[in-house]
Image (cartoon, helix red, strand yellow):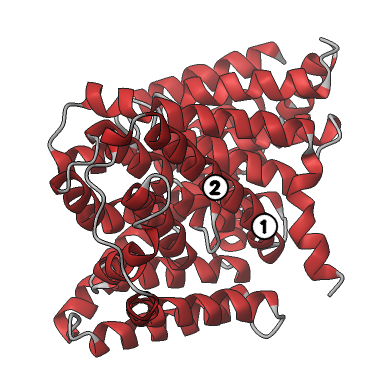
């Protein structure tokens, strides 16, 4: 069986290292393994069946709709509304407008589902505004990199949908499970910013003039469309009124309505958003197909059971296993993007986690957080590339600025490893409503 494992690594290195599309590389690796070790198996029939089963999944239908919603919102003035609506409320708190990036990313993540899109959308307004007001460059860059990753954790999340389909876990429960961890990480980011500002007030520039309560309440009108959209999309799912697919469809309609109401969206822009969403969905669909086919192939060969029994023989405690997987995913995140990480490792690591006593729901949140870490890990981290385009800073400086926020994510992984019940709090509360 070790021969099969080394063959898999060699084939993956061969196909993916030569620049083949990830989805096609995974399919090629699966076919090669079956031809080497199960030559009598009709892999073409298996691939056809897997293609139908994967791409016809009803749960997967929500994915293109949430992606389209994010593409439409990217063409509106939501980011400007976040800045004007939140800034009057933050002028006198420790850290002042330094919290804008975290709060803006948290709110936008509630209707986006993409880490890179959240970073780009919020960063194109807040980064320039804060830097022009004299805020510390490293603090602005680091907070944008860290908070931008919340696009994957706070529902709706494209990564959660993909994980839910692959792991056969309820997508709604995954969405519920992401709420509390997302809020806790956002609070940790804001706490770090407040402490840094308290220790060194020069990091957050000069204090802006105070605003009256009337002005603060008036500013909330700018947030009205976004808050309504969040309430409709998220509330309909958690209230049992709509499935994720139905909520996503309503979200698309709401996003289009916001765009036309703000007069920032026209029919050519809507067509461009649809084309961009179709491109993203085609890429994700091919990768998922390749991953599911490879998972089926190595399952027939017994590789997951072999690896699980081997690691089980090491006698690792559950917490030590989490530490090992955390280091493994940090290293992997330096050379791979998040979607590739989840589709290629899940068939191997999920059985290990379940054997250690953790649930698939818990592992879904763990995977999302380590993928968030991959988003800000050089040299592949997508968020770092987005920020480099926004600010023009070197990759080295951006990476150094993200270290505190990367550390917060790593510490939170350890926290949920020690207290896994954190993940179940919101799903259990909603189930008992």
Going from N to C along the chain, the mark reached first, 1 or 2, is 1
* Quadrant of residue 41 within the rendered picture: top right
Query: Callout 1: few (<14), some (14-19), or many (20+) C-alpha neighbours within 10 Å?
Result: many
Residue that badge 1 annotates: 174
Residue that badge 2 annotates: 187
Q: Which label lies toward us, 1 or 2?
A: 2
Image quadrant containing the N terminus: top right
**Going by the image, does 37 lie left or right of 389?**
right
Query: Callout 2: few (<14), some (14-19), or many (20+) C-alpha neighbours within 10 Å?
Result: some
- Residue 226 appears in view: yes
Please state the horizontal and vertical placement of residue 424, each as a whole percent of the image.
79, 52
Image quadrant containing the C terminus: bottom right
Residue 81, disc? none
Which residue sits at x=24%, y=73%? Answer: 77
Disc 1 is placed on an element classified as helix
Disc 2 is placed on an element classified as helix
Observer-nearest residue: 272 or 301?
Answer: 272
Q: Eyeballing the image, is 236 above or below 338?
A: below
Observer-nearest residue: 129 or 145?
Answer: 129
Which residue sits at x=56%, y=40%? Answer: 369
Please state the horizontal and vertical placement of residue 386, each as a whole percent of the image.
25, 43
Which residue sits at x=46%, y=57%? Answer: 106
């Amino acid at each position: 069986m070790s021969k099969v494992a080394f063959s898999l690594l060699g084939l993956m290195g061969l196909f993916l290292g030569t620049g083949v599309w990830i989805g096609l590389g995974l399919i090629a690796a699966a076919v090669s393994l079956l031809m080497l070790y199960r030559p009598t198996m009709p892999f073409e029939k298996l691939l056809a069946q897997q293609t139908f089963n994967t791409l016809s999944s009803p749960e997967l239908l929500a994915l293109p709709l949430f992606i389209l919603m994010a593409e439409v919102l990217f063409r509106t003035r939501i980011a400007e509304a976040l800045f004007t609506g939140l800034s009057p409320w933050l002028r006198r708190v420790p850290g002042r407008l330094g919290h804008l990036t975290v709060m803006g990313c948290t709110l936008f993540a509630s209707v986006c589902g993409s880490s890179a899109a959240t970073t780009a959308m919020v960063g194109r307004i807040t980064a320039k505004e804060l830097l022009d007001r004299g805020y510390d460059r490293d603090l602005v860059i680091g907070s944008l990199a860290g908070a931008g990753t919340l696009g994957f954790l706070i529902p709706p999340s494209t990564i959660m949908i993909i994980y839910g389909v692959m792991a056969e876990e309820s997508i709604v429960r995954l969405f519920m499970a992401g709420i509390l961890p997302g809020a806790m990480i956002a609070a940790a980011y804001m706490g770090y910013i407040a402490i840094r500002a308290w220790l060194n007030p020069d990091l957050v520039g000069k204090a802006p003039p105070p605003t009256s309560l009337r002005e603060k309440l008036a500013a909330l009108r700018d947030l009205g469309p976004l808050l309504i959209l969040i309430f409709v999309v998220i509330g309909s799912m958690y209230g049992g009124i709509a499935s994720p697919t139905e909520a996503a469809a309503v979200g698309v309609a709401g996003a289009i309505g916001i765009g036309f109401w703000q007069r920032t969206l026209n029919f050519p822009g809507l067509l461009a958003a649809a084309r961009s969403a179709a491109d993203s969905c085609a890429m994700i669909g091919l990768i998922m197909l390749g991953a599911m086919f490879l998972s089926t192939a190595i399952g027939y060969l017994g590789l997951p059971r072999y690896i699980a029994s081997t690691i089980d023989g090491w006698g690792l405690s559950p917490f030590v296993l989490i530490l090992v997987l955390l280091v493994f995913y940090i290293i992997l995140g330096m050379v791979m993007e998040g979607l590739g990480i989840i589709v290629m490792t899940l068939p191997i690591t999920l059985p290990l986690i379940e054997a250690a006593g953790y649930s698939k729901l818990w592992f879904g949140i763990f995977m999302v957080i380590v993928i968030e870490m991959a988003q800000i890990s050089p040299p592949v981290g997508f968020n770092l590339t987005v920020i480099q385009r926004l600010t023009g800073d070197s990759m080295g400086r951006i990476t150094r600025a993200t270290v505190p926020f990367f550390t917060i994510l790593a510490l939170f992984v350890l926290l949920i490893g020690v207290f896994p019940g954190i993940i179940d709090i919101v799903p259990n509360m909603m189930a008992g409503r």
